[in-house]
Structure formats: C-alpha cells, structure tokens
Image: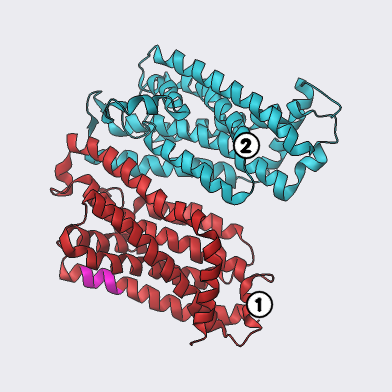
Chain colours: A cyan, B red
C-alpha cells in the first residue's frame, strides 16, 4: 500500500467509475424502487383500507407507512450497493485487482464506495418521493427535509454494508445477513407504531438503526417535528462513522492479502 | 427402482449439505412475516375496520395466504434458477443425460424433489400456524395438500420455461418484475374486494390468487364446494399443462 489517507480527487475517481457502470443499466435503479412501491401499494393502500387511521396518532395508514418505506428504500439501496455489490466485485468481477495497484488507497476505496452507495440511496429516495407525490401521499412540504436526511441513512447503512461484508466467507452467508435485515425491516416500526409492542420490547426496537432512520424521516414527512430527530441524526452519524472505521480496517485486509 | 428416483436421490444427497440456507428462506422468512405483518398489523386492523374481513381476525386471514405464497416461493427457489443452471453446459442435467436417464426421468426426479421441499416447508409453516391457532380445527388435513398443490402448480410450468433459458439474469428479472407483484397483489395481504373491478379480474386469474383462495377457504373452515373445485382444478390443470410442456422443453434442451 503506497498511498495512505484519502483525497477528494482519488475518492471521486472511484465514484465516477461506479457511476459509469450504473449508467449502463436501468434495471438496478428500477428494482430498488419497484419493491418499495409494491409494498406501498399493497400494504399501504390494500391493508390501509382495513386499518383506516392509525390509532393514537390519527394519521391515514398509507400516509403513515409511506415515510417508513422511504427509509427502508434508502437503507436497502445503500446497503445492497455496498454489501452484495462489493462482495460480487471481489469474488466474481475481481474489479479491485485492477483498482488496488492504482494510486487509490484503501481509505479512498472505502470512502468512494460509501459515497457511491449514499448517492444511489439518495437517488432511490428521490424516486420514491416522486412516486409518493404522484400517488398524493405528500402530506407536508417538509418532506423535502427527508431527502438530505436520507443521506444520513445512506451513510449509516453503506458503511455498515462494507463492514458486514468483510466478515462474510461466501455467498451463502448472505442468508445470515438476510436473517438480520428482514426482521429489522418488518419490526422497526415500518408498518406500525412502537406502541404496538409491550413496554419491555420497545428498547430492543429503539436501538435498531432502521428504527432511528424511520424516526428521522417520518416526522418531517408528516409535518411534525420532534427532538427525537436530533437523537436519530446523531445516532446515524456515530453508527456510520464507527462502521466506516471498521470497514476501512477490514477491507484493507480483505483486498491486500 | 424407477429411474426418476435416482435423480430424486441425487437432489436429496445434495440437499443434505445445503438445507440450512434454504431453511431460512422457506421457514424463517414466512414466520417473520406472520409475526411482523400478521400480528403487528393485525393489531392496527383490530383498532380499525376489522369488519371488512367478515369477522375474521387479520392474522387468521393473512396466515393461509402467506402459506400459499411461501409454497410458491419455495417452488421458485427450487425450479427457477436451479433448473437453468442444471441445464447449462456444465450443469448436473448434462451429466445425467449421458447415463440411461431420459429427459422425462430428469424432469420427474427433479419435480419429486421440489414436491419434497414444498411438502416439508409447508409442514413447518403449518406447524407454526397451529401454534398461532390460525387454522380452524381439523381442516389442517385439507390445508396441507392444498398448499403442496399450490407449490407444484407453480414449479412445473416454471421449470418448463427455465429449462429453455441460456442465461440466469432473466430468472432474476422474472422474480423482481412478475413474481413480486404477484406476491403483493394476490390477496395475501388484503381482500381482493378492495381492488377496482377490472384489476380484480386481472388478478383473479393469477395462480397465486387461486392458491390463496383455496388455502384460505380451507383454513378458515368454511370452504364453498364450488370454490374448492374451481380453484383446485385450475391449479391441477396448471400442473398438468406445465408437465406436458415441460416434457417437450426438457427433451428439446437436453437432447439438442
């Protein structure tokens, strides 16, 4: 390893590389929006007709669920872009064999991958907000704040994606990742408020990064503001930074050995 | 011993090494959905408009739908990309064709294995449903074969198609752009009565809709004889038609 630390120019070149590849195919972008839109239609509208208004907060169910799904959209786009895609590049494409000998340092590579994943998370979020707009689900103009907030969500999960990826031995291990991601998707108040849980379960939910992400996005989307948003933003910042530190350390070992 | 059983045996021996991973998809996945969606959202529904479901709790309504959907998902995992890979030049089907096995034997053997997978994963799922108390009484005896039929009615036509594919990504696109929408809109999560009329007509011919209706009617304990006959024979026809087509496509691809 010749270069240490990172520079904007070198990191940017990796982002550019990824952008050049993503530009070739619309399928990954479409599918990162399609699935959340299906959930929105099926659970938001379909199940929403059975729910009516969410009791206790008096919000239409579909309006309540939409920002939750928005958070999972940002999460999945960023997380898949780092965990699965990078693993694929190491195992199958061997892309880093060509990147490591260039002046890019490991820190450049890690940061560049996180930055590209954050970007695709933000793109997916913008796409989803557009769909919400078309479907008449934009309750408050404050949802515009949710877009920069989704940057933080992306940062947390993109970094975590690399960190997790470095621990995986082979493709079947992604099943184990799913074993964490799916319950988080289902239980982190995406589809119902925290008050559904008995009080002893609530702290277990509150420490989940997706719960904090939803906290960060749902309030502005519904036009209400809480100090909990600040806690969530701080949580994601720390979560992402710790994950980034772990990711940089471990990715170096994985790519150079 | 019929020759197809050799293929079945091969699949089983392979499965002994990989069953842990598939266990996650076919058992843990639906279990989490049952808990997260069934119980969690059910809680909201009970405070909302539960009357829309005709006096049935949301969990009881959702569980049999999810059973049918997960049977089809298992079918997809086993008969989707796996068949394409097996039929590729370096796949297991190619090795089998050099033995006395005919394409029909390979087809039947593989589908026996799919049946085994659907049989076991739906059994596990039904056990969970019993735990939640969502199946009414002895109807469980009828729900199980209905779920297995649902899985096979999807797997066999799917294999008839996937065996013809040269590349794998098409199967992924099929999953994303056709299977997922079917999964979300076939009345698993909500009653079809809510959909606009023309959408309902479109949705009601989907195999999963038929499977959901069949399993749900039986599981709730008040199936209509006409409904069971209609949904059952639809799925049986799909299975038979798929088998006829698959015989041709397997032979064409493997003896080409």
Q: Which residue is mark 2?
A: A82
Q: CA distance from mark 1 to mark 2?
A: 37 Å
Q: Which residue is mark 1?
A: B95
Q: Residue A250, percent across and down?
A: 69, 32
Q: Mark 1 or mark 2: which is in front?
A: 1
Chain ID of residue with mark 2 = A
> Which span is picked out in magenta?
B228-233
Chain ID of residue with mark 1 = B
Position of residue B2 relative to residue B166, above or below, is below
* Both marks 1 and 2 on one chain: no
- Who's the residue at 38% across and 28% down the image? A204
Tell me the quarter of the picture where residue B234 sits: bottom left
10 Å crowding of disc 2: few (<14), some (14-19), many (20+): many
Q: Nearer the viewer, residue A44 or A191?
A: A191
Q: Magenta part mainly helix, strand or loop?
A: helix
Q: Is residue B13 visible?
A: yes
SS type, badge 1: helix
Q: Residue A244, percent across and down?
A: 63, 25
């Amino acid at each position: 390893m010749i270069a240490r630390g990172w520079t904007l120019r070198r990191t940017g070149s990796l982002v550019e590389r990824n952008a050049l590849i993503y530009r070739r195919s619309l399928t990954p972008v479409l599918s990162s929006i399609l699935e959340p839109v299906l959930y929105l239609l099926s659970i938001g509208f379909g199940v929403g007709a059975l729910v009516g208004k969410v009791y206790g907060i008096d919000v239409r169910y579909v309006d309540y669920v939409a920002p939750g799904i928005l958070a999972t959209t940002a999460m999945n786009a960023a997380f898949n872009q780092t965990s699965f895609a990078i693993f694929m590049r190491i195992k199958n494409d061997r892309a880093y064999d060509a990147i490591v000998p260039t002046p890019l340092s490991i820190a450049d590579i890690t940061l560049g991958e996180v930055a590209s994943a954050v970007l695709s998370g933000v793109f997916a979020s913008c796409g989803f907000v557009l769909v919400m707009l078309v479907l008449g689900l934009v309750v408050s103009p404050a949802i515009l704040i949710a877009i920069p907030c989704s940057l933080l969500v992306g940062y947390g999960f993109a970094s975590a994606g690399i960190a997790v990826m470095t621990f995986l031995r082979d493709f079947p291990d992604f099943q184990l990742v799913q074993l964490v991601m799916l319950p988080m998707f289902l239980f982190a108040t995406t589809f119902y408020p925290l008050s559904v849980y008995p009080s002893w379960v609530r702290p277990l939910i509150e420490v989940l990064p997706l719960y904090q992400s939803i906290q960060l996005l749902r309030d502005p989307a519904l036009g209400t503001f809480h100090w909990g948003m600040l806690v969530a933003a701080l949580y994601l910042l720390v979560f992402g930074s710790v994950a980034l530190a772990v990711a940089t350390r471990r990715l170096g070992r994985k790519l150079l050995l | 011993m019929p020759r197809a059983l050799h293929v079945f045996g091969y699949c089983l021996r392979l499965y002994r090494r990989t069953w842990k991973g598939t266990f996650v998809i076919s058992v843990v996945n639906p279990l989490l959905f049952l808990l997260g969606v069934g119980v969690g959202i059910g809680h909201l529904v009970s405070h909302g408009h539960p009357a829309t479901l005709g006096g049935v709790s949301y969990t009881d309504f959702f569980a049999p739908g999810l059973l049918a959907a997960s049977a089809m998902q298992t079918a997809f995992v086993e008969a989707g990309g796996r068949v394409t890979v097996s039929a590729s030049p370096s796949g297991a089907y190619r090795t089998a064709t050099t033995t006395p096995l005919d394409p029909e034997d390979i087809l039947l053997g593989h589908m026996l294995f799919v049946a085994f997978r659907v049989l076991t994963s739906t059994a596990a799922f039904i056990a969970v449903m019993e735990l939640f108390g969502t199946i009414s009484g002895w109807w469980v005896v009828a729900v199980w074969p209905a779920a297995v039929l649902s899985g096979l009615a999807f797997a066999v036509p799917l294999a008839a198609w996937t065996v013809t594919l040269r590349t794998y990504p098409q199967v992924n696109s099929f999953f994303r752009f056709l299977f997922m929408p079917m999964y979300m809109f076939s009345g698993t999560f909500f009653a079809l009565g809510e959909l606009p009329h023309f959408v309902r007509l479109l949705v009601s011919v989907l195999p999963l809709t038929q499977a959901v209706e069949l399993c749900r009617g039986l599981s709730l304990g008040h199936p209509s004889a006409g409904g069971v006959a209609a949904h059952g024979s639809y799925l049986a026809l799909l299975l038979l038609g798929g088998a006829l087509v698959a015989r041709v496509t397997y032979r064409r691809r493997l003896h080409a």
